[in-house]
Amino acid sequence: MSENDTNAQATSNAPATPQYRYTTEMAQRIEEKWQDIWESEGTFWAANVSGELTDGKGRHADGRQSFFAMDMFPYPSGKGLHVGHPLGYLATDVVSRYHRMKGENVLHAMGYDAFGLPAEQYAVQTGQHPRITTEQNIANMRRQLRRMGLSFDDRRSFATIEPEYVRWTQWIFSRIYDAWYDPETRNPSGSMGCARPISTLIEQFRAGVRPIDGHEGKAWDELTEVEQSEVLNGYRLAYISKSPVNWCPGLGTVLANEEVTAEGRSERGNFPVFQRELRQWSMRITAYGHRLIEDLDSIDWPEKVKLMQRNWIGESHGASVHFKVPVDGEMADMEIYTTRPDTLFGATFCVVSPEHPMLEHVPQSWPEGVDPAWTGGYATPSEAVSAYRELAEAKTAADRVADNGEKTGLFTGLYAINPITGAKLPVFTADYVLMDYGTGAIMAVPGGDQRDYDFAVKYGLPVIYTVAPLPDSGDDLANYEGTAPFVSHDGIVINSAVDATWARGDALCLDGMRVDDAIAAVTTWLEEAQVGKGATSYRLRDWLFSRQRYWGEPFPIVYDEHEVPHLVPDSMLPINLPDVPDYSPKTFDPEDSQSSPEAPLSRNEDWVNVTLDLGDGPKTYHHDTNTMPNWAGSCWYYMRYLNPHDTEHMVERDEYDYWMGPKHSPAAGQAGGVDLYVGGVEHAVLHLLYSRFWHKILFDLGYVDSFEPFHKLFNQGMIQAYAYTDDRGQYVPAEDVQESEVDGKTVYTYEGEPVNREFGKMGKSLKNIVTPDYMYDHYGADTFRLYEMSMGPLDESRPWNTRNVVGGMRFLQRLWRNVIDENTGEVTVTDDAMDERTLKLLNNTIAEVTGEMEAMRPNTAIAKLIVLNNHLTGMNGVPRAAVEPLVLMVAPIAPHIAEELWNRLGHDESLAHHPWPQADDRYVGQDTVTAVVQIKGKVRAKLEVSADIDPDELEKMALEAVAERLGGKPPRKVIVKAPKIVSIVPGE
RNA sequence: GCCCCUGUGGCGAAAUGGUAUACGCAGCCGACUUAAAAUCGGUCGCUUCGGCUUGCGGGUUCGAGUCCCGCCAGGGGCACCA
């Protein structure tokens, strides 16, 4: 389009686009010019307090407020960007530029999260080494982002695959491995629980102040190295465990719970996931469950994300209770977990998970007269139990979903004795009880739990109701009996008299108590009788931390001939990946649940076997062949922006304190952290939880002085798009679809044929992608930025519509024309004084736009800038004193045109650090306002009055204005909110 | 099933409990053009001209898009967690 304009001017005598109009070509020239200037002058370099990055182009850190604005860094995937991707980057950039103009020292940079599945899969597809494709992708992404005019400090960019970065990722792993969680020590923030070096635990074992698990009564130094290693493994925050994990044959790797969907499939690739018992690395995130919930109160995050984290961690309070189980003439102990100890009187059977160790001790034969439904037709309990266990193991999460709550289970032949009633309860095994939650065993209370009720109905077990609705609730227990349990936590306890004094003659009667009080009473009783205690349980599981992939960080761990793990000394880090031709993961038939993972690194024997001197002479060791999950690099990258080339520290203390310390900025709270972190909500329980966990460990160990990584989190919305399908359901290119009106209805056609419109994501397969490059070519970066920022609130999703972009272009053209003559290219502003109206509008606009920028609402800021600009457009000669502040206010959103106009207005320095305009209070507000007279809330008259009108006078005027409507009757009530509203309630 | 968010013109959207529809797109009318595009100016919720309008029905209030209760629709999170 615009190209034709230029040609037309050269080749025909028809009136053409004026030579100095702000066209797409003009925009492109201006944008490239300023991007070069910013780069060569280091305009966006942020100044550190010390070290090599103190140079902020004459703007040093001393005494200046810091502001750290950060995006969730991207995977450099080969797919390239579409216009939806950079929405968050643009938002962060607008905020960064605004804060820079407020005089703050702004840290804003971009790194690349380059390990992990997307990069590896792209490499496998293209047959090139992931390092090569990753570096190409990073270069392409850098180019596209640079063209957007983002104000990054390019000295601080890095990728997580760089050896100098990997070194510190491995260093952090080493610190986590070398630490344990002491729940009895206060951490530096004052709350209970603290990670401490493992040496402090060894000291306790050695001093005999802590019993050694499994070796009670022995001295620490009597234990073999293997035994010591196993004991410590039970405490380390990064530990090896043989436990059921999510095994995904289709991807050839194990996955964390967070990476498995509710349907039991892999989040990436959508392959089936099976539970397999495997030896893998885990991180003890459950130790931090409580602090991860509690500290949410100290950070400025969307409630939605906080809620998702709270739900994911799933802290529940209750009690653990010990039931005696007669086994082979002795009394074994079975511990159960319940959130409702008050219902102990209503327990009519027990259930253990199919993996529960108690199942090793089932009796030889079924008791006399056992119900055949309970035995499943098996001849002995052990046959029944092992058959059921096999059945449960083969089930995928998807099967469980398909079961739709249908309960299965079998009797174990065992009985458990209820410690409070003495009742003998049959013990079942069923897969609705999970081994890795609570204790893997429950007391079943069918009168108060839907699942237990379903099970009881199926197996003909008794139901005892122990809780009734509150008497004044209008509900009646009779509504539940025989049909459903009464599950509410509101209610009163009934029916606790069931032999309550059996246990030890203590009277414990709960009748008439509210549930809360009854829970407390039973918990106290359990503790006094030493058969149980208050307990907290978490839905959160420990974080499975190893993957069988090539493209990730190797573990800084080697094993000796006894398979005892040893930490590789810090001085030998990083451990780099071997440069080998075969980096593909070993994948299997997605349905082959019996396959086992095979780490690609294990194929490189040269790399696997090493001779090291770890203090007792050179010995042969072998490397751990797993790699870390792709979350590892993103867990701590924010700190690396502070100085990505620091070879002495993960992060330097003074630098951390200046940029992220708890009191560095009024914007940050007590918890400290990055001032603004912008990214998609999809990481709510993945990256954002892992990152907080690592950060808290580093805080406990004293490496950082704030206990949260991200003070303010902002989730940008998604940019959605229309897609079109023809009558065969095939997608057609959205770009070429025509829109027209037929009989007042909008119809869409492609090559003359009608097509259906649907609404959703932007994607290549939907043929509705719009790329940033398309936008640069057709409108320029400033118009692109302006459109994305004006579409609506940043945190809401909305549809992209290229047709609407032109409005932003017109605004910039008018702004340009208000400064520059389109025909001569001369600056046309006047130095005349502003008229009163312009002065008022200008100062009101400054005040309002400042407010919108503070609140991160660029859409409404833009609307107000347009109003001011439109006003100036109508003037005869635009006053410099009005247009200069306008240019400054446009700068965060459309920085290139703003720099160009600022320069042409006679300023030599970039406006990037020019002070943000200040509103003159004398001209803020209105002289006259339209006062509205309402009768019963409906507008009946409007009055033009002075802004400082006396309320009594306004009331008088208002009553006069609507006298006719009041019909002479005195009003019953008059509310005056001068100068805007008079609200009248008429007399009867 | 449980929890959370969102419903305002033809479209994207504005509105500290105080004039609903700012700003932009599209549309319509006009100016400049031989013409078209671009640009500029105007107009732009519905209406039987009484009024009526923020998904629907109630409530609180002098006054509700905004607060409360109950529905409906769309989106998201969790889902045998004892």
Image (spheres, coloured by chain):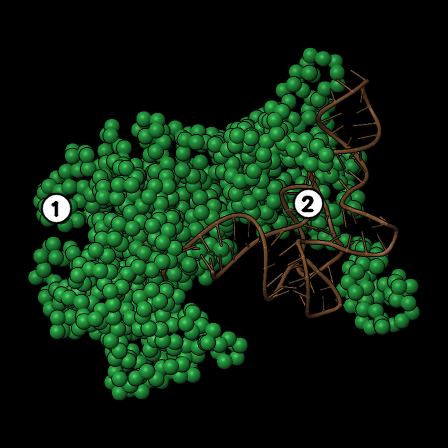
Chain colours: A green, B brown
> Mark 1 — residue?
A560
Q: CA distance from mark 1 to mark 2?
A: 69 Å
Q: In which quadrant is the C terminus of chain A drawn?
A: bottom right
Please, which chain is the residue tagged with disc 2 on? A
Between A614 and A144, the one lying in front of the other is A144
Q: Is residue A371 visible?
A: yes
Q: Amino acid at mark 2?
A: Lys
Quick one: quadrant of the N terminus of chain A?
Answer: top right
Q: Which mark is residue A864?
A: 2
**Image location of residue A612, percent across then percent down:** 13, 41
* Residue at image coords 12%, 39%: A611
- Whether residue A207 is visible, yes or no, is no
Instruction: From the viewer's side, name the closer residue of A543 and A514.
Output: A514
Q: Earlier in the sequence, mark 1 or mark 2?
A: 1
Q: Secondary structure at mark 1?
A: loop
Q: Position of residue A620 (x, y in %)?
A: 10, 41
Of discs 1 and 2, which sits in the foreground? 1
Callout 2: 10 Å neighbours few (<14), some, many (20+)?
Answer: some
Please state the horizontal and vertical placement of residue A138, each as a whole percent of the image: 40, 32
Q: Is residue A397 left or right of residue A883?
A: left
State left or right for residue A331 relative to residue A6. left
Question: Is A352 placed left or right of A876 in the picture?
Answer: left
| Kind of residue at disc 1 | Asp
Q: Secondary structure at mark 2?
A: helix
Residue at left 32%, top 40%? A165
At label 1, counting other C-alpha atoms closer than 10 Å, the crowd grade (few under 14, some 14-19, many 20 or more) is few
Q: In the rendered structure, the residue with mark 1 lies on which chain?
A: A
